[in-house]
Amino acid sequence: MPDSLPPKLLEHVAERFRVLGDVSRLSIISALIDVGEQNVGELAERLGAGQANVSKHLKVLHDAGIVTRRPDGTAAYYSVTDPSLMTLCSTVCDRLRDQVRSEAQTFSV
């Protein structure tokens, strides 16, 4: 990270990581990236979670600007609005894969 980041910006970065630091929210993001736009019921079924729980997490993601909501009659459809998430997730996952491979090599000797 650049040394010149002002404290207020660091607060926003920390908040973004707090929002992303929940396995349920990461599962929702992953499902939306994999399948595309879905409503609460579809996400709940796909994730094996309760609709109230999924709805609560979608509100957090929406309030953080990570997902967008499109009303359609009595339903609302959600999709990922922050394209940087794909890069971030890919970077973190690639690093974790490398780390696991390295640890596996260490223990296989």
Image (spheres, helix red, strand yellow):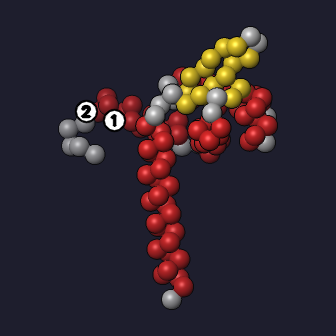
Residue 95 figure quarter? bottom left
Can residue 36 be seen here? yes
Q: Residue at x 49, y 61 (%)?
A: 96
For residue 57, side relative to residue 40 (left or right):
left
- Other residues around mark 1 within 10 Å, as few (<14) / some (14–19) / many (≥20): few
Dot 1 amino acid type: Leu
Question: Residue 69's quadrant in the figure?
Answer: top right
Task: Say above or below: 12 vs 103.
Answer: above
**Tag 2: amino acid:** Pro
Q: Tell me: 1 left or right of 25.
A: left
Q: Secondary structure at mark 2?
A: loop
Q: In the image, is residue 58 above or below residue 47?
A: above
Instruction: From the viewer's side, name the closer residue of 52 and 73.
Output: 73
Is residue 25 shown to the viewer in this render? Answer: no
Residue 101 position within the rendered picture, expressed as x and y whole percent measured from the top left: 50, 72
Query: Residue at the left extreme?
Result: 4
- The answer to whether residue 55 is left or right of residue 83 is right
Q: Which mark is residue 50?
A: none
* Picture residue at 47% right of the left edge, 58% below the top: 94
Which residue does the image show at 74% across and 42% down from the upper left? 47
Which residue position is annotated with label 2? 6
- The residue identified by callout 1 is 10
* Residue 98 % position (x, y): 46, 66
